[in-house]
Amino acid sequence: MGTDRTPIVYKIADNLKSLLEFQDTLEKNAPKKEQDIMLQFPTVYIHSWQDVDDYEVYIGESNNVIQRTKQHYDLRSNTHKWQHQLSTHDAILYIIGHEHFNKSLTLDIEHRLMH
């Protein structure tokens, strides 16, 4: 669990089963404060996969990372969308929360990570 200076970072397999297990584990086992930070407040998330000899990432932010990630998974079958990479590679999902994150800050972090 994070302190004032330490973010909460989860690394999971980037698929629906792992996402639902992450949600279930948080809801059943994590302290209430950590549940709130990760499930009810803005978070930054990173989808990462290796394509040939290079790594690719998608960086996003959301007030509801579970719902937003499910929306990404719904687009996996479209070969013209980046989400298709999630079904063709062993992707990793990083979910980052912090008790001081707000919408403006997560948007700034997302922007800085993209650059």
Image (cartoon, rainbow, N blue to C red):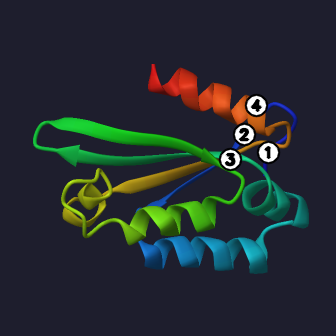
Residue found 30% across the figure and 60% down from its top: 86
Badge 3 amino acid: Thr
Amino acid marked by disc 1: Gly
Q: Give neighbour class at mark 2: few <14, some 14-19, many 20+ (Cα, 10 Å).
A: some
Mark 4 lies on a secondary structure that is helix
3 and 2 marks in contact (CB < 8 Å): no
> Which quadrant of the figure has residue 68?
bottom right
The image's mark for residue 43 is 3
Upstream in sequence: badge 3 or badge 1:
1
In the picture of the structure, the residue carrying the numbered disc 2 is 7
Look at 51% across and 26% down and name the residue there. 113
The residue sitting at 79% across, 38% down in the picture is 101
**First reached walking from the N terminus: tag 4 or tag 2:** 2
- Please name the residue that numbered disc 1 is placed on: 2
Residue 98 in percent (x, y) is at: 77, 42
Tally of numbered tags = 4
Query: Which residue lies under the disc numbered 4?
Result: 104
Q: Residues within 10 Å of mark 3 (few under 14, many from 20)?
A: many
**Element type at marker 2?**
loop
Cβ atoms at labels 2 and 1 below 8 Å apart: yes
Q: Position of residue 14 (x, y in %)?
A: 41, 62
- Tell me: residue 3, above or below residue 82: above
Task: Judge left or right: residue 49 versus residue 38.
Answer: left
As measured in the structure, the alpha-carbon distance from the residue carrying label 2 to the one carrying label 1 is 5 Å
Give x and y (percent) for residue 67. Answer: 60, 67
What amino acid is at disc 2?
Pro
2 or 1: tag closer to the N-terminus: 1
Which percent across, then down, holds residue 50?
22, 45
Q: Is residue 105 visible?
A: yes
